[in-house]
Each structure stands twice: as structure tokens, then as C-alpha cells.
Amino acid sequence: MTRWSLILLSACMCAALPGNGAVVELKDNAAIQGSVLAEKPDQIVIDIGYTVLVVPRDQILRIVGGEKGFAGSVGAASIETASGQKENLLFQSTDVPRPERSVRDLVRSLGESVVQIRTPGGLGSGFFISEQGFLITNFHVVESETQISVEVYHQRTGQIERANYKDVKIVAMNKFGDLALLKIEDENAPAFSPVPLGDSDAMSVGEHVFAIGSPLGLERTVTEGILSTKTRQLQGELYLQTTTQINPGNSGGPLFNLKGEVIGVTNMKMTFGEGLGFAIPIESVKYFLKHRDSFAYDNDNPSSPYRYLEPPGRISRVNPGKN
């Protein structure tokens, strides 16, 4: 019996096990149910309770739901809509309630997911939403820029190793929503550490939140505060207002709840005041990601955040009297 046959046998045995983990549907009409521990480009690691399986991606049909180590549940690479069509979400989210943790514990786990973004015109922050190098930042951080570098702080053997990636592609932009989707395309880049996206609508005013970013270039800076209001209207848009300190350089960084989920993207503060920071609600980020094709970046027109389709060509009338 081959190694893969043994895995399939284990899959059939555990398919009926109860639990709130992922369901990995295989091409052989088998399924595995358990908690996803790690996702790599060529394989996934899943805990089925009494053992851990390594499943090659070329044997996987799809992943539904999921739960991943500390990060909670891992959203599938695609979900099936009511019409039966598959929708590529690109980001991770959670459907399973997660316990709150201290900021100290969360920062230790989340620090590798937050990056510093540098351009000739300045710097900002960002965070990974997938292992493949997709990351979110503000539009104004990369506006009118094509030379972008991303500094990542890898945690290896208890030490922090800086890595600077310079092959960075702009995937999509939303100028009016102040959002940008980037992707690191450096050769031999490792799998990155994404963070799950939470639900800012479920937050209550007064809950504790914290931000990680690079204010004034001081990378890996952590600031803590509370959610002051969820519906602060500024220039026709609704923002999360927080007492968490936000300064230039924080732009594009994540605002976390105490479950380690991103509930907003920090993007501005009141100049003449303290404790008046603002973040884009994560629901706006999810909408941007789900409709990213509508905001696709056009290399031929880098000043525009939108991609315009080619106009239809002229349709010549067919003379019915001629063949």
C-alpha cells in the first residue's frame, strides 16, 4: 500500500468525525475533516485529531471552512456561492468564535505579518492577507509610484531577520477608498504569514484595539487604544475612530482586535489633536478584494487606479441578399 493510499484510508476514517475544522475535498471522492495547521504552495498540513496529514495540493479539489493554529479559521481559497459558482476570496477570515488574548501575546504572533513599504516618495505600512505575498496598504502610500520595496521581519530561531523584497507588483487600487493590493514576486520568496480579516460591524464602541506599523519609520511599533466610534463620517465616507496613536508611517497598517483579527486599515489622524486616529473598516477592504478586477491596476496608465475595457468594435451590417 502506497503512502498516499494510507492517507486516503485515514481520510475516509476521519471524514465522519465531528468538529469545526476545514473539510478538504479530494479528487478521489474522499474528504478530510480537521484543522488546517499550515498552507504551502505545494501542500497543506491538516490535524485530524489523532495524527497530522500532509496532503499534496494536486490531490485537493477544494477546501471549505477551516481552523488554523493560533490564527483561527482559515478561509478557503475559494468558496461556492448559492449559484454553484466559485468565488476566489484571496483573504482569510473566521467563522468560529475565537478567544481574546493579551496584546503582548498577539504581537509576538502577528509581528511577522506586518511590513514596512518604501517608495522614493516616502514610506508606510501594510500586512499580508495570503501566503503567496498578497498584501494590503493605502492607496496614498503607493500613489504615482512604481518603485516599491517591502521590508518583512521574518522570525526564525527566535531571532528577527529583515528581508527586503523589491519585485513588488501593484495588483489593484481604489483611489477613493484609499486602498491598494500589492504582491511580492521576488524569486525564491518564502511563504508569508497572513493575518485573518475580522468583522468591524461586530465590534462595540469601547472595545480595546491595537495597531502595528512604522510611524515616522520606526518599524514594528505597537500602539494600543479603544474603538471610539464605528461610524465617523469624513468626506462622505465612514471610518472607525480610535484612540490608538496613528502617525505618518502607520498608513496602510492593520488595526487589530484582541482576537488577532484585522478590523480596519489605519490611514489618517487629526493633525491638531491627540487620540484621534482613523481606520478604514475591514468590510470596505473585503469588498475591494472581492471586486479587485474592477480596480485592476493598468501599467500603461499608472496614474489611474481603474482599468477601462476596450470599446466594442463596429459591427458591419450583413446584406441578406449576399452570401
Image: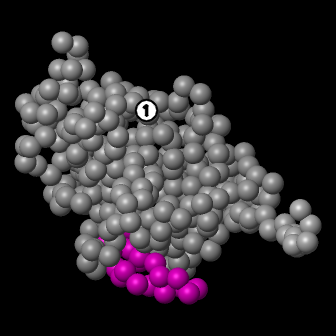
75 versus 238 height, above or below: above
Amino acid type at mark 1: Pro
* Residue 227 magenta: yes
Q: Is residue 251 visible?
A: no
The residue positioned 48% from the left and 57% from the top of the image is 253
Quadrant, the N terminus? top left
Residue closest to the eye, 220 or 150: 150
| Furthest-top residue in this view | 1
Q: Is residue 36 left or right of residue 178?
A: left
Q: Is residue 94 left or right of residue 244?
A: left
Displayed quadrant of residue 255: bottom left
Q: Is residue 66 visible?
A: yes
42 versus 120 height, above or below: above
Image x and y of residue 51, in percent = 12, 28
Which residue carries the number 1 mark?
Answer: 41
Q: Is residue 6 left or right of residue 77?
A: left
Q: Main secondary structure of the magenta part?
A: strand
Residue closest to the eye, 32 or 247: 32
Image x and y of residue 297, in percent = 68, 57
Q: Which residues are magenta?
A: 226-246
294 versus 274 height, above or below: above
The residue positioned 62% from the left and 74% from the top of the image is 176
Image x and y of residue 124, in percent = 57, 55
- Could you tell me which secondary element the residue under label 1 belongs to? loop
Quadrant, the C terminus? bottom right
Displayed quadrant of residue 260: bottom left
Image x and y of residue 147, in percent = 72, 45
